[in-house]
Structures are given as structure tokens and as C-alpha cells.
Amino acid sequence: MKVRVVEDALDANNTIARANREDFDRAGVTVVNLMSAPGAGKTALLERVLADTAGVRVGVLEGDVEGSLDAERLARLHVPVVQINTGAGFGGECHLDANMVRSAIGSLALDEIDLLVIENVGNLVCPAEFRVGEDVRAMVCSVAEGDDKPLKYPLMFRACELAIVNKIDLLEHVDADLQKLLANLQSAHPGIATMLCSARTGEGIDALRAWLLGLVRARASV
Amino acid sequence: MHELSVAAAVLDIAQRHAAGRRVVAIELHVGHLRQVVPDSLTRAFELLTHGTALDGTELRITQVPVRGRCLSCGACSELEQLPLDCPVCGSADVELIAGEELLVQSLELEEESCTA
């Protein structure tokens, strides 16, 4: 006997993501899911950007398989940071899913922040599959990874509204061609917004900060 | 390796719809744009079902090619590589109509034997 189902395999995750989103909305918190390959510079960019948040109250949810090295780096900026380790109780998963974020919501003082940045586990494949209740998805791709990554991992690039091209100070030392990278980004995701940054030199950081804090202001003015 | 999470989610859906009946097979549609590896998914599914009521259930994976409708010329075409431009007129203004799905399509359940 054949039974027709036609149900998205990730429906359960998406249902929990919607519940997270409702909690965030109720508290008036804008949520950004920040993703990238390991070592692309998510934490370094956040260190730069969150050093001055112009009065916007920012919290960070830090996802890693093990340890709290990144959380400790960000906590030095006196930003509230909650660590999720996917190695502890979540089977060493290579991504955050809605349920993991849900389990951390209780530890976040949502009433005391305006913006929550979820720094996902470094991985260019899996995090793109799982919505966590975010308003916006953004990713960091560093020029050191090469200019072909948008064509090799299109799902991640298609899932994000913004691609932050990091480590542009290394352009003269690596083989990546910036124009080719930008063209490949548009091939994978026509219309994706891009931003050129260097967490090391500070180039582009003001624009990134303006974009991030602008998400909160855009919401406040609705 | 998110195939384990996907397999667990598929398993939950199958168990809910089967409501205790034996599941012979699960038909899953995986769009080509989803980064799900069929072999890994099958292996993860076997691991999760081993020793359970769904041990031996077959996971039938159908890979769905990417298809788009061109908003400029109206052609519906299979899109084989990035960029996902219309192969007829070259426009980038293409609406995807298939290739992004990850759907539990149907279950094949064992016929209930009528012994009464």
C-alpha cells in the first residue's frame, strides 16, 4: 500500500525555527545567521565590528564543535556571548540547527539586546540547510579560499543575502582573482549583495558595521 | 555530514505516517541543488534504523534535476550548471521550478493481513 506524504524532510527543524523567530520577534531582537568555511574570519570580523556598536545592544551565540576559544575572544569586548558546543550532546554536528539554538535561548537575555549574531559552526555545506529562526543570513568568504568556491558550494551562497569577501589584504599573495570571485558569486546567486573587507587592516569594517547595525534601525523604523 | 540529521528527520516523518505499520520503503526526492549525498544519506539511514522496527526499510532516493522557467522568454528548461541562465535566450531572470526540494514523497506500507 502506497501512502502519499509530500512533506519537507526538514519540516520539524523549520517548525522549531519559526518558534525561535516568534520568541526573537516578541523580544524585538533582530537575528543574523553568520556562516562560512572554517577560518574565513567570522570571529575576527565580529571582534572589529563589535568594538563599537554605537549604542546598539548586541549579543552573540557562538557555535563550535568544541571549546569556547571564539566566545572568549568576543567576551573581551563586553558583549554577552552564549556558547553552543555541538560536540556536547548534539553528536558533534557540523552545523547549528533550530533545536540547538532553541536550547540556548533560555541563556540569552533577549530583553537586554537588540541584535543577535549567531556565529554558526565553520562549514561551507551543512549550515545552509538548517534555518534557525534568523531574519537574515550572511556569509564570509575569504579570498584565501580561492575564487571558485561559489561554484563548488552553491547552496551556501544561494542561501545568503550578503557575502562578505574577507582578507582582501591578502589579494596580492594569493592566486584568487577578485573580479572572478565576484562574478562567480553572481553566477551562484544573482543579485547577492557583496562587501569587501579585511579584518586585519580594518578596510571595509565601517561598511560592515553600518550594514549590521542598519538591520536593527530598519526594524525599529517599521 | 548533515546527512545523519536529514536521515533522522526522514525517519521521524515515516514513523509518524506509518503509525505502527511496517514500512517497506520510503520515497525521497532530493533536488540537485541540495547538498545531500545519496550514499551518505542511505548509510546514515541504515545506521539509525538498525535494530529498530524500520530495520530493512528501503530508502528510495530520486534525484531531481534543476528546472527553471525563464521570465523573459517563457521557456521551461533543465539547467545543468551555474549560472542558472535560460539556455534558450540566455536571460538570468529565471524562476526555479524544481531542484531545491528535499521531500518525503511517499511511503510503501505492508498490507495489513486480515486474520479476523
Image (spheres, coloured by chain):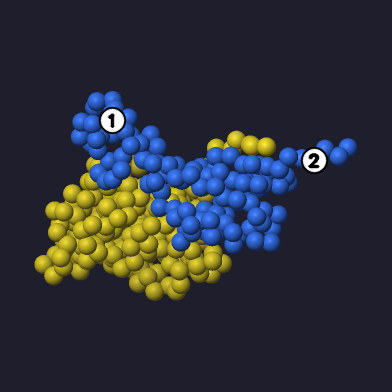
Chain colours: A yellow, B blue
Disc 2 target residue: B113
The residue shown at (37%, 46%) is B33
Disc 1 target residue: B70
Give the letter of the chain under mark 1. Answer: B
Could you tell me which secondary element the residue under label 1 belongs to?
Answer: strand
The residue shown at (13%, 53%) is A179
Q: Identify residue type, mark 1.
A: Cys
Q: Does label 1 or label 2 sit earlier along the sequence?
A: 1
Q: Is residue B44 left or right of residue A146?
A: right
In the figure, residue A148 lies in which quadrant? Answer: bottom left
Residue nearer the viewer, A107 or A130? A130
The local crowd at label 2, few if under 14, some if 14 to 19, many if 20 or more residues have their Cα within 10 Å, is few
Residue nearer the viewer, A181 or B43? B43
Q: Is residue A40 above or below residue A185?
A: below
Q: Is residue A117 left or right of residue B4?
A: left
Does residue A126 appear in this view?
Answer: yes
The local crowd at label 1, few if under 14, some if 14 to 19, many if 20 or more residues have their Cα within 10 Å, is many
Q: Which mark is residue A217?
A: none
Q: Identify residue type, mark 2.
A: Ser
The residue shown at (30%, 55%) is A152
Give the letter of the chain under mark 2. Answer: B
